[in-house]
Amino acid sequence: GEEERLETSSAKKLTDTGIRRIFSSEHDIFRESVRKFFQEEMIPYHSEWEKAGEVSREVWEKAGKQGLLGVDIAERHGGLEGICTQSCPGFGVHSAIAMPYIANYGSEEQIKHFIPQMTAGKCIGAIAMTEPGARSDLQGVKTNAKKEGSDWILNGSKVFISNGWLSDLVIVVVITNREAHSPAHGISLFLVENGTKGFIKGQKLHKTGLKAQDTAELFFEDVWLPASALLGEENRGFYYLMNASTETRNYVKQRKAFGKTIAHLQTVQHKLAELNTHICVTRAFVDSCLQLHERKSLDSSTACMAKYWYASYDCVQLHGGWGCMWEYPIPIYGGSNEIMKELIARDIVCDK
């Protein structure tokens, strides 16, 4: 039978594999192989990637060979048809966002052409939503595509695009019907390949967090796209889009204030106790979300709650001024909690 699992709160280390009751022994074997890959192929090079502002293409292909990309993609398309909750900078956007859009809404031709290459790590995917001045509000999208016969002409710009610099394929969120009774009814998704005439990658942006994940500005100047570049149905894009503890513990044992390490300060001890409790509670909620997702019952509001509930901000605070510096791997991850709050509140106050 299955070996009894420790509760998260009873584990010696929160990174122990066997403390998540949602997983089976088969999951544990896979998780250990992922950890081994991280230890051998990523951690030794991570500081170099942070300085370069991008992960090497070599590690993408190594991850592909080990089956770590597109884990939840159907086996018939080259995936493992499982669930993966941890990834290298950039892998998450590629595997958990870009690939599922293509696998779920793409044509048979698009799936056959892109998914095997993406699973192998030879084609890096990104999704371009955020625009200058529009934040992450999809209903404020200005980038547009106009029909020219059966083809499309794309114009606009995007910013803060994860994987944008290395991307071989970008899913671009655009407005295709300005006359729609609401912006949500006029949004479409297009597949734009690197090298397409008029598709320009701007500067690589430097961040305080996720420094090894390349983030870039993207520009589209009269990009001519064939009808086959449309992902899913025209004007249905909005519906498709809707449907650091251990390091901190080590740091506070070393950092000194008032003549002793801050780990001996009662207020810091209380904060660490709060963080440990938050992690235990968060894991239970995230595991619940995973079960809902597996049953295809996870709604956007619940997912936003999982993203909003966090402990990392307090980890940054415990680092003092160093929490904003490159020397420690703890700075802000990315995105805005205000956006998550807006999405949660929208679901609370709307008439159902």
Image (tube, rainbow, N blue to C red):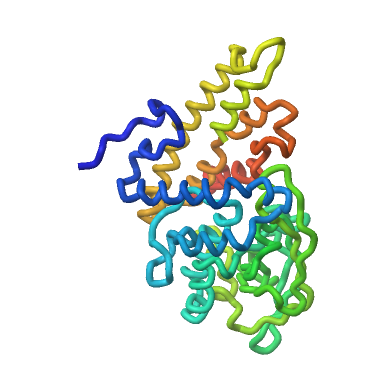
User: What percent of the width, then of the height, locates residue 164?
Assistant: 68, 62
Numbered circles on residues, count: 0
Q: Is residue 85 above or below residue 163?
A: above
Question: In the image, is 60 to the left or to the right of 172?
Answer: left
Q: Which residue is situated farthest in the left direction here?
A: 1
Question: In the image, is 45 to the left or to the right of 119?
Answer: right
Q: Residue at x 36, y 46 (%)?
A: 28
Which one is nearer the viewer's eye here, 310 or 135?
310
Whether residue 186 is visible to the viewer of this picture, yes or no, is no
Residue 295: image quadrant is bottom left
Q: Residue at x 62, y 13 (%)?
A: 265
User: What percent of the width, then of the height, locates residue 184?
Assistant: 61, 63
User: What percent of the width, then of the height, locates residue 251?
Assistant: 62, 26
Q: Residue at x 71, y 10 (%)?
A: 258
Q: Residue at x 57, y 21 (%)?
A: 271
Which one is nearer the viewer's eye here, 286 or 123?
123
Q: Which residue is situated farthest in the top direction here?
A: 259
The quadrant of the picture occupied by the N terminus is: top left
Q: Is residue 101 above or below residue 321?
A: below
Question: In the image, is 32 to the left or to the right of 167?
Answer: left
Q: Which residue is situated farthest in the bottom direction here?
A: 149
User: What percent of the width, then of the height, locates residue 64?
Assistant: 50, 63
Whether residue 218 is visible to the viewer of this picture, yes or no, is yes
Residue 349: image quadrant is top right
